[in-house]
Image: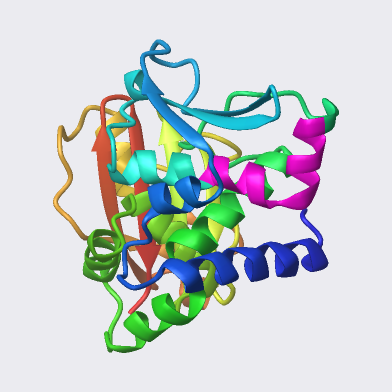
Amino acid sequence: MIDSSSLSKIKKIAGSISGNFNTEKIIPLHLIAESEDIEVFYDHYDKGTFDGMTVYDDNEFYIHINIDNHNRFNSPRSRFTLAHELGHYFIDTHRVGLKLGILEPHPSKIDKVQFDKIEREADYFAACLLMPEESFQRDLWKRKKFSFKVIDELSKEYNVSKTSCALRFAEIGNHPIKIVYAENGFVKWQKNSQGFPFWNLLNDKKVPEGLAMADYFNNVKTSIENPEEIFAIDCFEGVKSEDSRRIFYEHCIVYENCALSIIWED
């Protein structure tokens, strides 16, 4: 866990920066880097190695973005990567650690929920910078009812990935949701909004058969018709008998051996 005081400081730093560069909804990350004399390099560093890396050398900071990992310039993925790396620069303890050699330059991967404190702090900075809370919530309240369409629209408006948009919504949104990410039929991570009624999935790691994504991994379906109705009893732990037929909706995004589901209740 990151303590609340750290989160508050990171949010304040990101909010101050976005406030200085938010003439448009899409935050101009390269102008932020240029304002700090940080050179950003987009280059080939081999697929699967890393998304981004911040390096301090000869009294200068450099950010390397790996285009072999689908980080095309100004794409939603590369924007989160760059915002994450800027977090390593703007968060005081990260910047000082890099300068003093206490914090070694290390590869960042943005398509996973981070368990390392340093990486989670940089992820939080990126989310706050790319989707400022006040602006993001104002856009949410324009939409009266939640569906996946809200995530889809906002991700395009802010030029961020659907995953990062959904995670931001889970944190500060106005409707409880659950996000589940799995690979090869096994859950890698899940994230709940405050207020989502069922905290844990059935099974320890294996995707519950009641989820639409299970049909994809079991080769029952090659694509998912979204959204699909699912029943609480088939998916979640701790479901009481009176809630056994409680209906939820699942929107599942699939790609090769991966699937991301966003789950909500009307």
Q: Which residue is drawn at 58% across and 63% down?
A: 14
Residue 88 in the magenta stretch? The answer is yes
Asked if residue 233 can be seen in this view, the reply is: no
* Magenta segment includes 24: no
Magenta stretch, main secondary structure class: helix
Report x, y in % for residue 21.
Answer: 43, 67
- Which x, y percent locates residue 210? 37, 49
Q: Is residue 6 above or below residue 49?
A: below
- Image height of 255 relative to 202, above or below: above
- The segment highlighted magenta reads 84-99
**Residue 55 screen position, x and y as percent:** 63, 26
Of 139 and 240, nearer the camera is 139
Going 59% across and 56% down the picture, which residue do you hit? 125
**Residue name at image x 61 percent, y 48 percent:** 87
Q: Which sits in the foreground, 192 or 14?
A: 14
Question: Residue 178: x percent and y percent?
Answer: 47, 61
The reply to whether residue 9 is visible in this rendering is: yes
Check the picture and name the quadrant holding the C terminus.
bottom left
